[in-house]
Amino acid sequence: MGPAGIRTYAGPVTSVAAVGRRGGGILARLLLLVLVAVVAGVLSAGLLLPAIGGIGAFARGSTESFESLPADLQAAPLPQRSRILAADGSLIATFYDQNRISVPLAAIAPIMRTAIVAIEDSRFYEHGGIDLRGTTRALVNNARGQDIQGGSTLTQQYVKNVLIEAARTDAEREAARARTPARKLREARYAIALEEKLGKDEILNRYLNIAYFGQGAYGVEAASRQFFGVPAASLTLPQAATLAGLVQNPSTYDPTLAPRLALSRRNVVLDRMAELGDITPEAAAKARAGGLGLKFTKAGNGCESSGSPFFCDYVLHVMRLDPAFGATRDDRVHLLLAGGLTIRTTLDRTVQVAAKRAVDSAIPPTDKSGIATAIALVEPGTGKVLALAENRTWGTDPAKGQTQVNYAVDYAYGGSTGAQAGSTFKAFTLAAAIKAGIPMSTFISSPPVKTFKNFVECGTGRPFPPYTVPNSTGSGVFDMRTGTWLSVNTFYVGLEERTGLCDPVAVAESMGMRTASGQRIERVPSFTLGTSYVSPLRLANAYATFAARGMYCDPVVVTSVVDSKGTKLPLPKTSCRRVLDKAVADAVSSVLAGVIDGPDPRRTGRAMSIDRPAAGKTGTTDGHMATWFAGFTPALASAVWVGDPAGRKELQNITIDGRYYPTVFGGSIAGPVWQRTMSQALEGVPARPFAEIDPTVIQGARVRVPDVVGMSPARATAELAAVGLYGLTGRSIDSTVRAGAVADTSPGPGARVSSGTAVRLYLSTGTAPAPSPSPTPVTPPPASAPGGIPPVTTPVTGPVTPPVAPKPVKPGKPVKPVKPPAPPR
């Protein structure tokens, strides 16, 4: 006896087990007579065996039939729950088909091993896989029409569970559970072979890891944690007896639903243990005197039980969609739900908490307006997704502020179809213009409304219809800085007209931009005003490219995956690559920094300062259907969206969280959410400045104006664009050049100008210019004229005033000499 009068099996009983295995073949063949007799329908009316004279021949045939059954039981790896962890190793969520944590026998309390053997198979260490006594009793009672009884050994129960786990169809699962002699015969054959192959302790360990204990708990470790909040190694006698009693009928004896039945069943186990001498009567009595002592905590399954459900859901979609985790979607789902994976992610708890607080404080989940806001945060230079949050809770009841749509990500990853990005897309046109060498000091006249007629399609060169654009933030003449700080529409469409449509879109796509539906960005004149529907994560990651000085990184959310055996699995392929020169990215960051902390008091991001170098851009869509703020520091980038998830409500004349807004702009709600999140997320992180801007970028590239005289306007515009100049059609002039072709340019051919300069094209009327009037001849004065002025030989036009003769000097008066100046000291 051990402590408190408890005797436990700490290891195999070698001699008894060996005897059991040696006798296994004989016992099997004796039992075979009974099993096959039942299969053949011989058992009836209480008769157990046919006439003795027929036993010999019948037994020989039965033995041969029994031996022909398959004996090699293929046990697939047990389904085990997977865990998703944050970057710091804390648990985000668990996923499973079966809540199981497989453990070695040494991690299971000896008293638990003793209890399960006592109540389920007290002769476990004595038989060779089948118990003739128990099985015969069950068969006789069943054949007589009495209650269906078991009689299976632990080994046979293990075999049954393995066959259930291996079933892939409902029919196979039903066959594995069916209470038929045929199933018993097959189980017996497998059990005998298994006992020849494995040791008793190995079989017991496998059984304790595969058995179902109720309430979704498979295996003793998961059951122990779920019902008592302790690992299986720490189970006490009453706890072990409770769990051991559950396996016979987990639903009937469920201690959470039927505590009295569970208590009664536990006491049956205690009594049996005392009867077998595993524990003393005193220990049994003491254990019986106590209650169940449950500390029930059901393991969460899925994102609904997570504190970061929308980030969790994004990870789940990545696991389901990426071929790195399996050839088919079903393979990936099975790996996630049954593979016992430990998935380490990029989630930063500090950033996530800051983001969630900011969105909920801006617009409560149950706000009557129904307006939503979402934010995504990315680490520049790595692509790590640090946080995803929205002002909703996970669920299916909109009245409670619930949704299962992740507004921060693309549609394929559980998100929506996105929202128009508004003026946040102006940053891509700015980058394309600086990349093309257009000086940042380039001025463009930007009236309140302007119609643009010079856009052509990428590739085809076909002209777009005239495109009329209004301003909402002022008008005048702006350069790249002021036009960005005030987000002037007509300035930016004019700048886009100079770069052409192809380059700004190419810049955006090189920085990962796609629509939230996964489509390419449209190459249309409205591109720079953000008419494409995108997700916050796409936009945040693109802005992170500016923060990383032109290095774009694919989004990363999973950093490691380890299976239940400790083997590291391959990860999705991601990379970082340079898509912008450092000088270009630094220049964009410099301009966008002025949106937040620039000198112009009218700047759109004037209220977003976070007391460290930061850059950003507001965005408001046409009709105010959505508003944005995207911004970054060298350490963190993020994008915030605000709008109606259904896409029906305009953000005008609306009350949100008790405050009335005549019109909602990017700086109204999205900007403050960005500011609060970034301030809290970066608390304690050393501030870093942006890189100094390259002076040559400010000045732009210097190029020569090509000679395009005689070309068509389209060809001349293309020739100018090839060297970074912008062709602007001017008035027609008379010229001998064919009508409609370029007759002259300003600046003229060969002139050195800054890239992006507008070159005006003067088109020929095809009519020769009128000759200039002939000059009027002038009669020269006489050669003897006073003063000795020579005659005029060059013809001039217009009247000529005769020269005035100098006044003669009076004779006889001496001329006074001029005194030379004194030398300098």
Image (tube, rainbow, N blue to C red):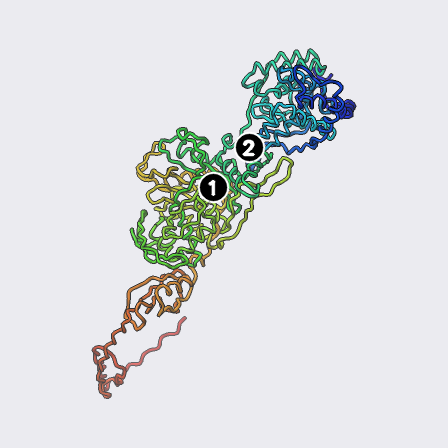
Q: Is residue 189 above or below residue 425?
A: above
Residue under the point 32% across and 69% down: 743
> Can residue 224 be seen here?
no
Q: Quadrant of residue 49?
A: top right
Question: Could you classify mark 1 by the number of other residues whose Cα lies within 10 Å: few (under 14), some (14-19), or many (20 or more)?
Answer: some
Front one among 647 and 30? 30
Indicate whether 147 appears above or below 197.
above
Residue 538 on image: x %, y %: 46, 45
Q: Quadrant of residue 775?
A: bottom left
Quadrant in which the N terminus appears: top right
Please give the label number shown on residue 95. Answer: 2
Gap between marks 2 and 1 measured at Cα = 20 Å
The secondary element bearing badge 2 is classed as: strand
Q: Is residue 634 above or below residue 25?
A: below
Is residue 782 shown left or right of residue 38?
Answer: left
Disc 2 marks a residue whose amino acid type is: Phe
Residue located at (31% from left, 81% from top)? 817
- Residue 14 as seen in the image, left or right of residue 214: right
602 relative to 198, above or below: below
Q: Which residue is mark 1?
A: 412
